[in-house]
Amino acid sequence: MNTTELNHRLKQILQPSPSGVVGMADALLELCFRECIEIRATNFGITSRQANGTETNVIVNPWPRSSVFRAILARIIARCNDYSVDSVPIYGGDGIWARSMDEVSQLRISVSNTTSDSRIHILPEPNRVRQLDTQALANGTAVKDASSEKYISALLKG
Amino acid sequence: MAMLLHGTTRERAERIALTGPDPMFVELGGPSAGSFSAYFQEGPFHLGTPEMYAIGKARNFPSEGGPVIIEMDIPGDIIDAAADELLFPPSQGLVQFDPDHGLQELRDGWSRVAIRIRPVDQL
């Protein structure tokens, strides 16, 4: 996924739709998992980083309703707790998520959901990054440069 | 008319029961709440159950009397004022009362809302 496609996809995810805030949160998790994308989000917008180091910024100011971002965070906390029971308190903490218990790869999620501090960091688990990077090298689509090496190296160090 | 549930602490629930949800309510160290959320009794509970919220708040604020659920019978016109098919569709179970989206209607119509408070067992 190139930068333009990612930017478009993020904006698309954040558009109000019949799938509501639940759909927004689920689509963000799915995007991070499938495309191996790191995301940092606050009430003002989203910064994403791909494995090759490319960053994308999507500014969301204002949200269509003030409560939307916190509802997205609450949904992601609930998904973490579905995956691992009672792992993340309602006001936030660190958790993990994967599409199913059978998945080897997971997302690491750090979230704060209070009135004074609303933010989230979603980070693909290192094995997932390594797996996709290997696939990309095999099919010749990898973008290997200093920033991607640094990013993957940092992830693998945990 | 529909029954909505809100998980909180007893102290907060008794305050809400008296005067309605307060958008200026301030949790320790934070800005004002600004909004109020509740679930349809029948769910679904995609953002966590009311019991989970009650227990979570009670754990963070242990001097507030423990976890409770506020059960509210809210007239349909008030719920309709909060409805938003593209952000908080009723099928997702959550009714989000925000400024300009039902919060004022809920406060103005609070005398028409029947309220019960029940404790939540902590595991």
Image: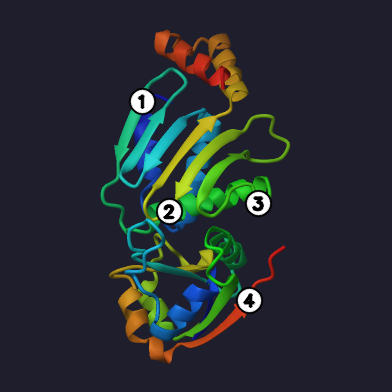
Numbered tag placed on residue A55 in the rendering: 1
Mark pair 3, 1: CA separation: 33 Å
Q: Which residue is mark 4?
A: B119
Residue closest to the eye, B35 or A11: B35
| Chain of the residue that carries numbered disc 4 in the rendered image | B
Residue closest to the eye, A14 or A47: A47
Above or below, B20 against A139 in this view is below
Residue located at (36% from left, 68% from top):
B25
Name the element at disc 3: loop
Name the element at disc 2: loop
How far across and down, in percent of the image, does residue A129 sit? Answer: 56, 21
The type of residue carrying mark 2 is Thr
Other-residue count near label 3 (Cα within 10 Å), few / some / many at <14 / 14–19 / ≥20? some
On screen, residue A98 versus residue A56, left or right, reads: right
Identify the mark nearer the N-term, 2 or 3: 3
Same subunit, labels 2 and 4: the answer reads no
The type of residue carrying mark 4 is Pro
On screen, residue A96 versus residue B105, left or right, reads: right
Residue located at (44% from left, 17% from top):
A52
Mark pair 3, 4: CA separation: 20 Å
